[in-house]
Each structure stands twice: as C-alpha cells, then as structure tokens.
Image (cartoon, helix red, strand yellow):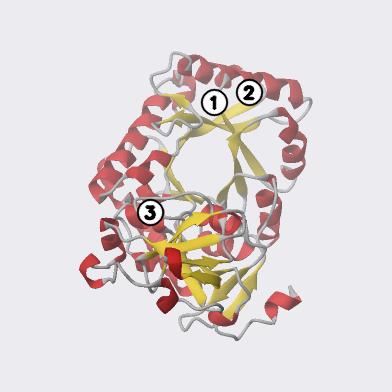
Amino acid sequence: MAWYDSYIGKPVTDLPTPSLILSKPTIERNISQLHQDVKNLGIAFRPHVKTLKSLEVTRLMLDNGLYRKIVASTLPEIEGALPLVKEGVLDECLYSMPIYPSVLPRLAQLSDTLKIVLMIDNEQHIDILEQFQGTRASWPVFIKIDVGTRRAGVVKSSSVLPSLVRRVEESPAVELYGFYCHAGHSYACRTSEAAASVLKDEVEGVVSASKFLSKKESGRKVIVSIGSTPTAHVVSSLREVLPEGLELELHAGNFPCNDLQQVCTGLIPATAQSVRVLTEVCSVYPERNEALINAGTIALSKETSDLPGYGRVIDRPQWAVVRTSQEHGILGLSAAPALSVLGVNNNEVDTEEKADQTFRIGDRVLLWCQHACITASAFPVYFVADEKDIVREAWAPWKGW
C-alpha cells in the first residue's frame, strides 16, 4: 500500500496503467440520493457490499451506523466488514448464496461476532442445516423468491413453496427471518415506468409468498426484502404498494458506482458513474483504424449493454473497446444511436475519425466500464479522486471467495 499511497496528491492521469479510479464526490452523491429515498419512505435498508468490497464504501452505505445490516456474496466480504462491528456500526449480515455444506463451519465461526442470516430456496437446505446444527441455536433464514430473474429462488407459483414455508416453520434448525427477492432482470428496463413495474412485481412476489405462513407465525414481524440498483432508482414509487403488517427492506449494491449498463436503463445520467478505468495506448494501426490499449478482458470484463463494446472512451465516446483478449484491448470506432444516453448527439461526433490522428503511443485514456462490479473485482486497489481529479486516497478491496 505504501507504493499505491505514493500517488496521493497526484492527478489521476499520472497513475500507473491500468488503474481503477473512483470519484468520491459522485459516490457520496449517489449514496445520499438513495438514503434520502429510503428515509422518505420510512423503510429499512440493507446495502450489498459485492461491488467495491471495501470498508470505506461499506461505511458510507451504512451511513455510519444509521443502517446496520449488509448483504455479502463471499466470505471475505463478511470477514472484511468485521472491523465495522467493532466500530459499532454493523450488526448483521445476510450471506446471499443459497446455503451449501462446506461454507457452514466458517459462517458458524463468524456468527460468534456478527449475526449471520442464511438464504434458502430448497427443502434440502433444511436437511443440511439440521445435520449441521448440533447444539447451536437455530439459523435465521430468508426464503428466496424468484420474481423473474431465473437465477436463485422459488417462483411464487411453485407447488413446493407452501411446503418449504411449512418446513421452515417446523424445523428446530431454522427460524423464518423473511422473504427475499432480487430483480436482476430489471437491468433490461429502459424507463422509470418499467423499473417501477418490476419493483411492484417484486413486492407482490414476496408478499404473496408470505401468505403461506401459518396463523401462528403470521402475527410476528417478517422482513420482506426487495431490490436491485435499477429498481432502487425508482424506490419512491413504493408508496403505492407498501404492504400492511410486513416490514419492507430495500437492498441494492451497485448504486454507489453505476456503469454503462445502468446508464442504458435511462434511470441515471452518465455523470452518475463513479468508476473509470485509466488505460494507456500501446500501439496504433492506421491500416485498420484501431489502437491497442493495456486494458483487456481481465481489466474490463466481457459484458456489454445497449452501448456496444466493453468500455467507452469518456471524452471520445464514438471510440469503444471493440475487442479484447486477456490483457489487450482494441479501440475502434463504434458510433451507435445509444450514444444519446451519454448525452452525445451522433450528428456532432466524427464517425470517420482516424486512429493515428486521435491516439499516440503513451496517451492516457479514461474509460467508462460496462459492469462496475466485475471490473472492480480485477483491481488490487482503488484510487479515490476528488472533484478536481486529484488522488486523495487508495482503498484496498477484499478479495477471494
């Protein structure tokens, strides 16, 4: 970290390449906006730590203890957040993968320090937890409901859902904490109305699942946890569908960062992106009108959006990373109607610009990324810049599974 810290006080364009740069003012604005929406609604909030995986961002998302629960996808994320328990700002963590046997010993150990909530969507999960339980107290569990993403979860119309709810109520190894869903398919939304519709479907999906609770259980508090970053952007629309007698909780993870996928939903402006990748031109090829940069698949990911390519040059958005291999990225012209989501008028860009007149070897190029979560996972450190693009901090993220 001493080497990374040596760049503090320097412009971001002086950083080694490739580097991941965070705009702290943008992160703070994005978090503040979602916090305000949550406060206006009077609902609970559980940030997901999967994107930037760091103490600094997690502390901001928790608002220094105003919110005290997180979601984590990996064990290092949970372990990395433990200092926040000592700080008195974190009480609970949901492990977001449906439970599997090999992870239970480590989660049990972590539960001595932090309340751990598990995710289940299959009666076999109850069998596993009953076999593991021994003399320990029962595990609090969320039942995962699939509301259209087709990843994890039981669809609300499934014939197995009522029996799963009954099994949870009857097993000494678990106690029902609530119902959880994640609308990952909301990334296909292109309007606030469409995102609000998905959010309404989320609420209705988990609320309908709660109807299978026995009368004995239905009187106690049950958490209904919904969310994703696209639907979180329209969380204010929840006022119309807030359920009676259930405690509603919003979860989201990408929102401090945003990325080209989020911009393409039409729910945020390009200026709400806080993540950039600094790369360097390594060569130029006039005969094919392309340039080579040192940010490839590992630095950028292979994900795309309505904006073609694996990244966009920020100050020349008609240039995209059109091909990648492991460490190589190829810059090529890639104008598209979707450039309008970046605030760019296609009529104002030169779609015949020449690579050898635009780029020289050694040029530093800043890119927007397609999916901030995957892009950030590749970098060992995040350089954190102020509003003048001067590096002020270097954050070390949590790594591994």
From the viewer's perspective, is the residue at label 3 or at label 2 nearer?
3
Q: Which residue is rendered at x = 36% and y = 43% of the image?
A: 186
Along the viewing direction, whichever of 149 and 120 lies nearer the viewer: 149
Q: Is residue 363 above or below residue 144?
A: below
Earlier-in-chain disc, 3 versus 2 = 2
Task: Identify the secondary structure beneath mark 3.
Answer: loop
Q: Which mark is residue 43?
A: none
Question: Does residue 67 appear left or right of residue 201 in this picture?
Answer: right
- Give the residue furthest to the front: 287
Among numbered discs 1 and 3, the one appearing first in the sequence: 1
Residue kind at label 2, given as amino acid type: His
The residue where tag 2 is placed is: 125
Judged from the image, the secondary structure of the residue bearing numbered disc 1 is loop
Q: Please, what is the three-letter code of the amino acid marked with disc 3?
A: Pro
Quadrant holding the N terminus: bottom right
Q: Is residue 147 above or below residue 197?
A: above
Position of residue 284 measured from the top left corner of the image (x, y, whole percent)? 50, 71
Could you say where residue 291 lies in the image, as x and y percent from the top left? 49, 68
Name the quadrant containing residue 249. Answer: top left
Point out the image quarter for the C terminus: top right
| Residue ID at (65%, 51%) | 77
Residue at x 69%, y 22% (from the top left corner): 128
Most foreground residue, 260 or 78: 260
The tag on residue 308 is 3
